[in-house]
Amino acid sequence: MEQFRALTPFITLFLAVGLAIIGWFIRELIRDSRENFANLRSDLGARLDKMEADIDKLEGKVEMDIKTIEASRALDQKWVYENFIEKELYFRTVGEIKGLISKIFEEIKEVNRQVNQQIGAARKGQSNG
């Protein structure tokens, strides 16, 4: 028992130093991890910025390509119209289509008027009965 009492302070000192070393080691690991995460964050931010710049360049190129294609398409349509379509036939067809559309709308208005009259008559009959 006397030997245990004599060794107790040394055991306590040894355990305290061990805990201090473990705490220091954990603190260093946490510091290194934070530095690594900070570096990773800045690297990812730089990569994202570069990707955004690349996307902007591609968007500009695509927009220019679309404008070029639209201009080419308009020229092609104009050429086809001028070379293969008779103007009198074109204007006659467009006029007929406009006439058909106006007839359809007139018929829809007439059907709507008739339905409204029938609904009004049905409502009068229900309120009187």
Image (cartoon, helix red, strand yellow):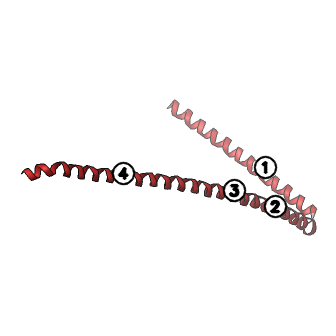
Q: How much space separates mark 1 and mark 2, taking CA atoms?
A: 32 Å
**Residue at 72% across, 48% down:** 107
**Residue at 69% across, 56% down:** 53
Residue that carries the numbered disc 3 in the rendered image:
53
Give the residue type that dot 1 points to.
Answer: Ser
Give the residue type that dot 4 points to.
Answer: Trp
Query: In which quarter of the view is residue 62 placed?
Result: bottom right
In-front residue for pair 123/80: 80
Give the residue type that dot 3 points to.
Answer: Ala
Q: Reading the chain from its start, which is encountered first: label 1 or label 3?
A: 3
Element type at mark 1: helix
Q: Position of residue 73 (x, y in %)?
A: 83, 64
Residue that carries the numbered disc 2 in the rendered image:
70
Q: How much space separates mark 2 and mark 4, taking CA atoms?
A: 68 Å
Find out whether the residues at labels 1 and 2 contact each other: C-beta distance under 8 Å.
no
Q: Reading the chain from its start, which is encountered first: label 2 or label 4?
A: 4
Q: How much space separates mark 1 and mark 4, taking CA atoms?
A: 88 Å
**Residue at 88% across, 67% down:** 80
Mark 3 neighbour density, 10 Å: few (under 14) some (14–19) many (20 or more): few
